[in-house]
Image (cartoon, helix red, strand yellow):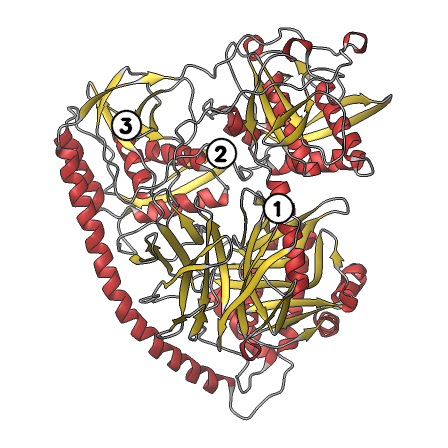
Amino acid sequence: MKTSSKLLYILLFGFILQLFSTKVYSQTYEEWLKQQKKEFADYKQKEKENFAKFVKERDEYIQKLDKEYSDYLKQEWKKFDLFVNKKPPAKPKPVGKPVYKPEQAAKVVNTIKVEKPVAKPTVKVPPKLPIVQKSEAEKFPTRHKQFRFYGKNVAFDYDQKFLNTFPSKISEQVISENWDKMAKINYNHLINKMLEYKSDMNLNDWGYYLLIKKAAKQIAPGSKNAATFVEWFLLIKSNYKARLAYKNNSLYLLLPSVNNIYGVSFFTFNNVKFYLIDAKQKDVFTYKKDFPEANVIMDLDISSPINTAENIKEKSFNFNYEGQDYPIKIKYNQNSIDFYKDYPLSDIKVYFDAAVSTVTKETLAEQLLPLIKDKSETEAVSLLLNFVQTAFAYKTDQQQFGKEKFYFPDELFYYPYSDCEDRSVLFSYLVRQLLDIDVIGLNYPGHMSTAVKFSENVEGDYVNYKGQKYIICDATYVNAPIGRVMPQFKDVAAKVVELNNHQNLAEKKRKIWDLVYKAGGNHGSNGQDIVFDKEGNAYVTGYFKGEATFGKHNLKSTNNTNDIFIAKYNKNGEVEYAYKVGGQGNDIAYGIELDDNNCYYVTGSFNKDIKFGSHLLKVKSFGDVFLAKLSAKGGLKWVSQAGIEALDSINNIFMASFNPDGKRISYKVYNESETFNNYGVSIDSSGIAYLTGSLTATTGLSVSNVSFNDYTAFNPITTLKTENDKLISQQYNKSIAGLFAVIHLINNSGISLPGKMAQNALDKYNPSFKKASPNIYDNIGRVQFLKNSQGVVTIRTDNSKAVYFDAVKISNNSKFKVSSYNSGNAVINILSGISVGKAIIWYDLNFIKLLKDTGDIVFDYDSDHTQKKVNLGRDILD
């Protein structure tokens, strides 16, 4: 990633240097800037007055919630009996390694039975919404603590009034009184810091729980009850559902979970299991009502690679396929392994669907992709199957650990032995990740296997599941070819474990978006702008300018402005319908979602009046956001406006909720958050739709206080130097201040820059670069930036061909958008066309985040949001 970071710096630096070469007018830059700032200040003052009203109402709302919850906690708690899921149900596994013997293999192809799925109550996961936070002082007396968290140093300051002791005799009254005390202190600063660490380390819900738990122990090291209380309070105020329990003057934490947790006591309330974490009790006293704003139920899924500190180890493996030896070396992160050691035992699907740590993901691709890149689908799967069957020593969990333990894929490269579940997990990951092929798990009594849905005609034992043929691939049955079930299981019905296939879904999205690009459409954001229904139909939205042709549907935007398109493609990639929504302004759709009733929702922004069907949507000031509900056939059910108001910053988050009939039932404004990213539309189990966004992060409505399209004059060298020095005086890291100066200017300009001009800038300001990096220098000449009036930067290339900069591929008409936060940090959101990787495999780049205090740059890529962090000064410029 070092080269790609250097590329970003060079390109943007070249852009700004050439930006300064434009024509100079009579009025000075400083005079013009004062005029622009005065106009913006007037607008800001009006919005600040409106926002102050919302702040007052929000603080009163939180105060009311805290008081009501305190009163509730005073009431008598009920005694609940606890139960335990001792372990996943299973019969004894094969003690020895099962080996395939061709002479004993049955020649008859078997249709393997699968159990009919039994409908079970599922936990309805509520939409994740921003955190409602009260106003707090910027400065107050604090204490400082720090601890190590899987190799990373976690340092934080917190209000010195935080609870660190607890009364020896516990009662409902005591708990209520301590809630009141905690509710009055400055706790949001600590929560925001913990959320920053959560984001920085890509932690899932369990990781965040462990982080809060460690912080609470630091705050109250001498009192287990005080630490538990702080843990509970911080989780609730982080929007997590959590309950407190007590017995014999000891406090306990109860956490609900979307997934089963084995070996931990629990009670069930409204089909949700609440687990007694870190304790063994048969019964406890607790309550039934959750804090109203706490809506997140802990999910043990690891959907993105955990970014612990690096402690890289390497291990060698060997396997022989078709008479040829293949030695490979796989790296793993010991800190990630340590994180998995602290994971509770859960459903096998959690392990099947888990993302793999970055270093293991990359080395698996580097080592295995060259072996399968020229093979057919069947040959590639066969090689991967043989690798997993033969490269690892076999022992059951009971033999190795004395208890049941499931592995995450990384763990096979750490532990000396593995059994059937572990091998099935790794094999399914490799097939889905490297080949984009669907896999299901087959859970037999005492055994776990997998089956693969080939696109080719493959012979062998198979299962029919939901009308699709899956060929048996048993990763534990040593040397067994594709399509061979273990003899003892050929007449045994297996339970199917449905697995997520993020790579396959990402590829389906790419194929539809390739058709959209050809039609003339563009991404409105890098969020969810395409969804698929159960039949494989795709619903997609975004924006277009000028003309767009979706199949037989010709769309034309209003007066060549940006208009919204909404389109449906069937499973064969054919356009079912497409139509536009727009007016005289900048209209961009940025989110779409399906509900459970064969309808979908689209959200977008507009800054002038628009027509949606027969409905006229009007704006008040700078614009608004709409939410529309449509049938699968494209019929408009209803459309409503969010009614954006009282945003004192373009970075404030807004949320509007709508009932199933489209009536707006609530509107809230939240403080800026660099860690919240669940923008767009979410639907809860009752049909309530939640619309979230911010002017700078999601919509096309950002209000700028400077626009270099209209400026009159400024000196190119002194202006850049002035901006750079100003940022350094504002505590920007010196190594990255110049890049931020570029960002600030590129984000407010509308000037085209040919790559040849960037080369001229490098010749003048960095003459040694051409000799040191000739390939990169030449490729810079093949690109140009084009900044349009809606804040989207387009990169065009010579001859419309992709340009390669080592680990970065830039396609013609690539697009990105820059967002700056009040903290000074910035995010470059990639809308399309830029990927990272190597010749064999490429991953879509999602965003690049620039951190002003440290000089760090974070790259987020692939559908699982793998992240890498580099430091501009230490890793790139030195």
Residue at screen point 56% across, 83% down = 714
In which quadrant will I find the C terminus? bottom right
Tag 1, which secondary structure?
A: helix
x then y, percent, for residue 90 = 51, 12
Can you identify the residue that label 3 sits on? 222
* Label at residue 761: none
Which amino acid type is shown beneath numbered disc 3?
Gly
Camera-nearest residue between 28 and 726: 28
Camera-nearest residue between 257 and 567: 567
Can you identify the residue that label 1 sits on? 506
* Comparing labels 1 and 2, the label whose residue is closer to the camera: 1
Compared to 587, does 454 lie above or below?
A: above
Camera-nearest residue between 707 and 624: 624
Camera-nearest residue between 663 and 437: 663
Which amino acid type is shown beneath numbered disc 2?
Asp
Can you identify the residue that label 2 sits on? 301
Is residue 463 among what the camera can see? Answer: yes
| Mark 3 or 1, nearer chain start | 3
Pointers 3 and 2 in contact (CB under 8 A)? no
Total number of numbered discs in the rendering: 3
Residue at screen point 64% across, 53% down = 512
